[in-house]
Image: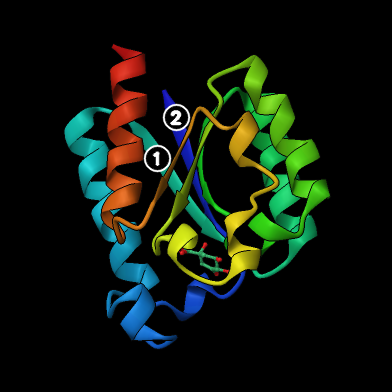
Amino acid sequence: MKVLVLNGPNLNRLGKRQPEIYGSTTLEDVEMFVAKRAEELGLDVECRQSNYEGQLVEWVHEAADQKWAVIINPGAYTHTSVALRDALVELQDNNGFVEVHISNVHAREEFRKHSYVSDIARGTIAGLGIQGYLLALEYFASQAS
Ligand code: DQA
């Protein structure tokens, strides 16, 4: 199974941006940990990041066409993007997607409590730091075997 790991806006700033909330690990490190865990689990993985909503939408279309599973941290688009939701709906026909948040969005500002994508995700992992991406990989590995 191929898994596409998508990170949305500002996640390229991991390690520099609000380290008290998001930690000191960089996106490069996260992608390295993801690649290592995927290899151990026998999953084919690819990581991409964009600050642009339309780019994320187009990558989700690609995943739908290729029948890839998706792990996505949509960043702030979680709370704003109907367009991203509409794209992600299509993944439900195949392997689906897991929504990941590094921080516990339910323990923060009120506006972070609403997600446009949670109800159509296989599941949501929030607040477990970068471990969330690795747990999502384990979920897809368990589905593949
Ligand atoms: C985030 C939480 C979002 O509310 C925020 O806008 C982000 C990161 C997280 O990983 O905790 O950019 O998705």
* Residue in view at x 53 percent, y 56 percent: 48
Contact between marks 1 and 2 (CB within 8 A): the answer is: yes
Q: Residues within 10 Å of mark 2 (few under 14, many from 20)?
A: many
* Residue in view at x 28 percent, y 40 percent: 135
**Tag 1 residue:** 45
- Tell me: residue 36, above or below residue 63: below
- Colour scheme of the rendered structure: rainbow
Q: Tag 2 or tag 1, which sits nearer the N-term? A: 2
Residue 25: percent from left, percent from top: 28, 74
**Tag 2 residue:** 2
Q: How many marks?
A: 2
* Residue in view at x 40 percent, y 60 percent: 104
Between 32 and 73, the one lying in front of the other is: 73
On screen, residue 65 versus residue 34, left or right, reads: right
* Residue in view at x 49 percent, y 70 percent: 108
- Tell me: residue 99, above or below residue 28: above
Question: Label 1's element?
Answer: strand
Extreme-left residue of the structure? 40
What is the three-letter code of the residue carrying label 2?
Lys
Specify the quadrant that holds the N terminus. Answer: top left
